[in-house]
Amino acid sequence: MTIETTLSTPAQAAATALRETNATVAVAESATGGLISASLLSIPGASTYFLAGATVYTYASRNEFLDLHRDDVAHLQPMTEAMAAHFAETVRAKFDADWGVAELGVAGPGGVPYNGGIDPGTSVIAVAGPRTASTTTRTGSNDREANMWAFARGALGLLHKTVVSFTAYGAPPMP
């Protein structure tokens, strides 16, 4: 699969919404391994809206890239929309972006034991900014690569929908 054939529509839609509102974005992604950032960067003009992307796959990378420590999320259940929202707000604030996107997931082929057990093909995604949104994606599949792409499409779609819904209510473009 290529970004062009797999994600051109969601990435283009999100990029267009960001450009049209003069907004910036920073991304913290886990199970997608950089696909969200790569998709946004594949659109010409990305330097006008894309500030940063970090693959926060491990506790060490979360500490290093986001200054996010276990104590910072101890009050949150792992793999929940609330945790994804915290990551989205953290990456947004760290890079002084208008929007932050976070994705935390289990691509597979196995699940994870915490939080009562999370099946492969599950991802929590959040967007933080002037408007916030979150969603949970469940593919029902243990196909790692297919899940990674599905999660990335979900994140790009949520970013697009959130930016558009914010501006649809008469919000002016970002300064």
Image (cartoon, rainbow, N blue to C red):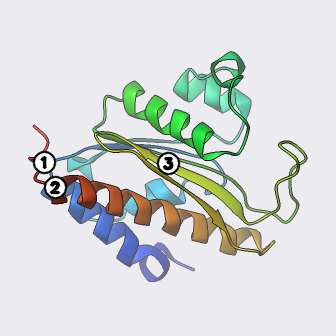
Q: Residues within 10 Å of mark 2 (few under 14, many from 20)?
A: few
User: On the image, which quarter does residue 40 sit in?
Assistant: bottom left
Residue at x 24% of width, y 52% of height? 166
- Quarter of the picture holding the N terminus: bottom right
Q: Is residue 9 left or right of residue 69?
A: left
Mark 1 or 3, closer to the camera: 1
Q: Residues within 10 Å of mark 1 (few under 14, many from 20)?
A: few
Percent x, y for residue 155?
48, 59
Mark 3 or 2, closer to the camera: 2
Q: Secondary structure at mark 1?
A: loop
Q: Residues within 10 Å of mark 3 (few under 14, many from 20)?
A: many
Q: Which residue is mark 2?
A: 169
CB contact under 8 Å: marks 2 and 1: yes
Q: Amino acid at mark 3?
A: Ala
Q: Which residue is mark 1?
A: 171
Q: Secondary structure at mark 3?
A: strand
